[in-house]
């Protein structure tokens, strides 16, 4: 996914960010949100 697909025209985003890393988006895998950098996982 390209960076321009993650942000709106005004610079805002609706994606969840990792609470540990802070600057990394969480990947949505349907049943969970996962950080590829530190391994943090939120189960839905």
Image (tube, rainbow, N blue to C red):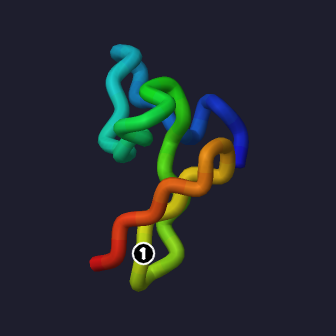
40 or 23, nearer to the observer: 40
Residue that appears at 50% across and 25% down: 23
41 or 9, nearer to the observer: 41
Residue neighbourhood size for the residue with mark 1, other residues' Cα within 10 Å, grouped as few (<14), some (14–19), many (≥20):
few
20 or 15, nearer to the observer: 20
Location of residue 19 by image quarter: top left
Q: Which residue is mark 1?
A: 32
**Does 37 sit left or right of 20 as displayed?**
right
Tell me the element at label 1.
strand
What percent of the width, then of the height, locates residue 32? Answer: 42, 75
What percent of the width, then of the height, locates residue 15? Answer: 38, 45
Residue that appears at 67% across and 43% down: 37
Q: Is residue 18 above or below residue 28?
A: above
Location of residue 9 by image quarter: top left
Residue that appears at 40% across and 29% down: 8
**Does 3 sit left or right of 26 as displayed?**
right
Of all residues, the one furthest to the top in this rendering is: 10
């Amino acid at each position: 996914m390209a960076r321009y697909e993650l942000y709106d025209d005004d610079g805002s985003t609706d994606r969840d960010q990792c609470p540990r890393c802070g600057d990394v988006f969480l990947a949505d895998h349907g049943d969970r949100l996962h950080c590829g950098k530190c391994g943090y996982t939120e189960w839905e």
